[in-house]
Image (cartoon, grey):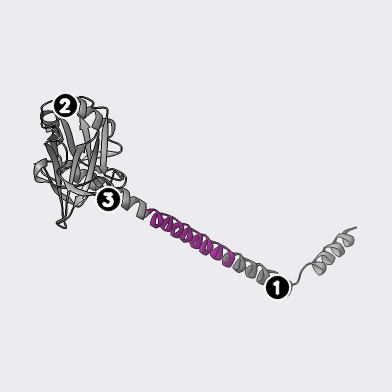
């Protein structure tokens, strides 16, 4: 039996891997480890590239949104500048305009804003020359279109109004009167307007009219006659 175990032990030794095989296995393991390290390095590089790509995508999205952000900031800046310009201006409304007219303008604040690019920014007109119902012609601008114009309101009927310019076509006034630089009350007898089918030049009805002067030197007249309001550009 002793000889049997000794023989079996030498058989196991003779069947085990040789030094050359062990060296080969170790070489293969080393190669696999190197390959694994290389793959891990490539994986890290790809993760880094993916992170960089995600950063680029985020930057591109931010860049795409910049025009809208700039537009919003410009709008806020313009609003702040306007507010700075109107300090002490809007607060004087109650001293100049009747409460009913102020309330009507507040109800229209999303459409029109009162501006002060013309001094005075409003006129109180009595087209009939009397002291009955005062009519107020106020300088305004369309909020969305930024087109200048005027709004006519009546003190005795503050809910009624008529817009000249400021995005609205009214008679022949056009929808933008931003080029008007001055307006004032004039005696009707000093003005001639086209009248009737023959367009004869006559004195407009009523006692008073409103004359306008544009930046290019042309003039216009606004008057009340025959139950309606009329606008007419005047010849030189």
- Residue at (20, 51) in percent of width and height: 233
Where in the figure is residue 227, as x and y percent of width and height? 25, 33
Where in the figure is residue 216, as x and y percent of width and height? 16, 58
> In terms of secondary structure, what is the magenta stretch mainly?
helix
Of tags 1 and 3, the one toward the viewer is 3
Label 1: which residue?
24
Residue 8: quadrant of the picture:
bottom right
Give the Cα separation between the discs numbered 3 and 2: 42 Å
Label 2: which residue?
133
Viewer-proximal residue among 63 and 80: 80
Q: Which mark is residue 74?
A: 3
Q: Earlier in the sequence, mark 2 or mark 1?
A: 1
Q: Residues within 10 Å of mark 1 (few under 14, many from 20)?
A: few
- 16 left or right, relative to 57: right
Q: Is residue 51 visible?
A: yes
Give the Cα separation between the discs numbered 2 and 1: 113 Å
**Secondary structure beneath disc 2?**
loop
**Secondary structure beneath disc 1?**
helix
- Which residues fall within the magenta stretch? 38-65
Q: Residues within 10 Å of mark 2 (few under 14, many from 20)?
A: some
The residue lying furthest to the bottom in this view is 20
């Amino acid at each position: 039996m002793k000889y049997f175990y000794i023989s079996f032990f030498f058989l196991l030794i003779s069947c085990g891997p040789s030094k050359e095989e062990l060296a080969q296995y170790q070489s293969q393991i080393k190669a696999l480890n190197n390959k694994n390290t290389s793959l891990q390095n490539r994986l890290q590089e790809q993760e880094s590239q993916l992170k960089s790509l995600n950063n680029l995508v985020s930057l591109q999205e931010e860049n795409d949104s910049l025009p809208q952000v700039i537009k919003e900031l410009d709008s806020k800046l313009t609003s702040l500048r306007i507010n700075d310009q109107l300090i002490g201006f809007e607060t004087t409304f109650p001293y100049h305009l009747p409460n009913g007219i102020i309330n009507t303008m507040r109800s229209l604040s999303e459409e029109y804003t009162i501006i002060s690019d013309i001094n005075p920014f409003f006129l109180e007109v009595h087209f009939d020359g009397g002291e009955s119902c005062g009519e107020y012609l106020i300088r305004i601008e369309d909020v969305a279109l930024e087109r200048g114009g005027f709004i006519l309101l009546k003190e005795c009927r503050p809910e009624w109004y008529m817009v000249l310019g400021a995005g609205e076509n009214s008679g022949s006034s056009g929808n933008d009167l931003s080029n008007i630089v001055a307006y004032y009350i004039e005696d009707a007898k000093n003005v001639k307007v086209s009248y009737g089918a023959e367009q004869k030049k006559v004195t407009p009805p009523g006692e008073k009219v409103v004359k306008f002067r544009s930046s290019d030197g042309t003039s216009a007249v606004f008057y009340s006659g025959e139950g309606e309001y009329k606008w007419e550009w005047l010849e030189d």
